[in-house]
Every structure is written in structure tokens, then in C-alpha cells.
Amino acid sequence: MTRLDAGGVMLNAEVAGQGPPVVLLHGFTGSARGWARVTEALAGEFTMIACDIIGHGQSDAPEGLDHYRMRQVADDLAMLVQRVGYPRATWLGYSMGGRTALQVAVYRPDVVAALILEGASPGLRTEKERAERVASDEVLAQRLEADGVEPFTDYWQAIPLFASHASLPKDVWDAQRAGRLRNSVRGLANSLRGMGTGSQEGVHERLSEVRVPALLMAGEGDTRYTAVGHEMAAAMPDATMHVIAGGGHAAHLEQPERFTALVLEFLRRVHGTTAS
């Protein structure tokens, strides 16, 4: 565990491996530990920097919302990675972490060498959509505060988006649940309020500015995000989109071999490396 001051908050990064750096950003209710299998598969060739996003894992969960605003999250994470020792890296993000990685690519291109997004989106297009999502996330935040982390986790992992997780091996399911339970009410509630899809600025019109090599992925059962992924890939100058057979919204857990093979092929191409 490496907790460092990043813009006035302490953020945690788990660092392993050697070679060109890859930053890993988890989804909502997740943590750096959720990337263990990916890290194990890639650390022989790349330095894996798995970060706990604000309000999650071993990172701070401040009371105020300032450090949960998406633009600030991007700046703070960029500072964290630089303080770990890497001025630029490949950024890999899943779901909420994918939205975050995309924001980093748009607003902090100086720290991004390449981009990998899994089950991610550029946000919502209209003010009406954003307002509706903000209201929906506020209901979730209040549910968290009223019920606590464990009942909320039971609810969250049963939503239709995660239906494919029923096929996960028991040890993977148990590890994911245990990670979720280690989060705090305040951290998760403020994450919803500060960096939810409705709260963040949509970046649809700025996708053409993301000129670094980009790999976009989604599981074939995750039809919403496969469609979004194809749209984003078409708008980016140097992006490819892959649909992972047999995967749902968390293909890195559901089809880890296929996921890591795609990531490894991409990273080797970007960095001009071969199998060691």
C-alpha cells in the first residue's frame, strides 16, 4: 500500500511489476484489489499502478464534495501517479474508472500515453439526462446513508447490470463482495454525488481530441456499453473496439484470459515490446 498526498487528499496506489507503467482504475464500490488477477497476468512486463479512487478502498473519504468532482478527481489521480514516479502512463479504467480515465485523457493529456476503457461512457449528452441521473444517484446515496454498506452492497450487486456475475467462480465473487464491504458509507455516497454520470461533464464532443492509441472493450452481454464503445471508437482518431465473447459488464472478471490477452497485445503494440 502506498498512500500519498495528491492535492490535499491521501490517495492509495498498489504498485507491482516492472516495465512501462499502466494505471488501473476500478468501478463504483470497487478498489485497487479488484485488479489482482490482471496485475498478476501483466506485471512481468509492465508496472501496474492500481489506484483507489477517492472515497474507495484505502484512499481518503472526505466529507466535502470538492475532491469528488470529476475534473478534480482527474487532477488528483494524475498527481498521485506522478508522485509514484511516472509522468505519463497507459490508463486503464473500468465502468466508473473508465469514465474517469477518459476524463484524464481529455483534460490531462500530458499524463496519458495510451488509453484502455472497459464498459465505459463519455457521460450523458443532455442537461435533462444529467439532471435525472443526479436525482437517481441522490436516491442511492440516501439509501446508503440510511441502510449502511452491507445492505447497499446486497442491493447493488443484484441490479440487472451485474446479472452475469452469477457465473463468477465463488472465490472471485467472495473477493469482490469483501472489497465492496471495506468501503465507507460517506465515501460511496459522496462518490455518487460528486462523480456520478450525471454530475460529470459529458465529453462526447471532445472525443476527437483523444489522439493517443486507445483500446475500448465491453462484454457481449453488456449491450448498452458495447453500443457506446462502438460510438466512442468511431469518434477517436486511433481507437479500436473489441466485444469480449461470454462477458458482461465486468469482462475482466468474467473472461479474464480473453481480457488480459487483448490488453497485453495492445500494450505490446503501443510500447513496441514482445513477450519476455
Image (cartoon, grey):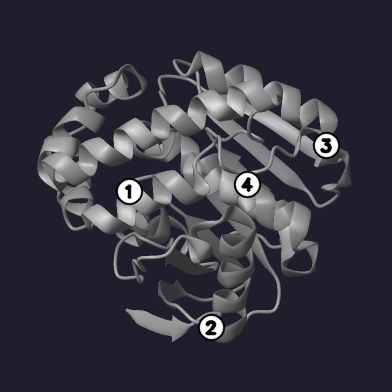
Look at discs 3 and 1 and give the one toward the viewer.
1
* Badge 3 amino acid: Met
SS for callout 3: loop
What crowding class fits label 3: few (fewer than 14 Cα within 10 Å), some (14-19), or many (20 or more)? some
For the point 58% across and 32% down, the residue is 217
Q: CA distance from mark 3 to mark 1?
A: 33 Å
> Label 4 belongs to which residue?
116
CB-based contact (under 8 Å), mark 2 and mark 4: no
Going from N to C along the chain, the mark reached first, 1 or 2, is 2
What crowding class fits label 4: few (fewer than 14 Cα within 10 Å), some (14-19), or many (20 or more)? many
Going from N to C along the chain, the mark reached first, 1 or 4, is 4
* Badge 4 amino acid: Ile
Q: CA distance from mark 1 to mark 2?
A: 28 Å
SS for callout 2: helix
> Label 2 belongs to which residue?
84
Going from N to C along the chain, the mark reached first, 4 or 3, is 4
User: Which of the two residues, 137 or 178, is positioned nearer the viewer here?
Assistant: 137
* Badge 1 amino acid: Ala
Q: CA distance from mark 1 to mark 4?
A: 27 Å
CB-based contact (under 8 Å), mark 1 and mark 4: no
Q: Which mark is residue 189?
A: 1
CB-based contact (under 8 Å), mark 1 and mark 2: no
CB-based contact (under 8 Å), mark 4 and mark 3: no
Residue 167 placed where, x, y %?
Answer: 22, 23
Question: In this rendering, does residue 272 appear at all?
Answer: no
SS for callout 1: helix
Q: Quadrant of residue 114?
A: bottom right
Look at discs 1 and 4 and give the one toward the viewer.
1
> Label 3 belongs to which residue?
236
What crowding class fits label 1: few (fewer than 14 Cα within 10 Å), some (14-19), or many (20 or more)? many
User: Which of the two residues, 116 or 80, is positioned nearer the viewer here?
Assistant: 80
* Badge 2 amino acid: Val
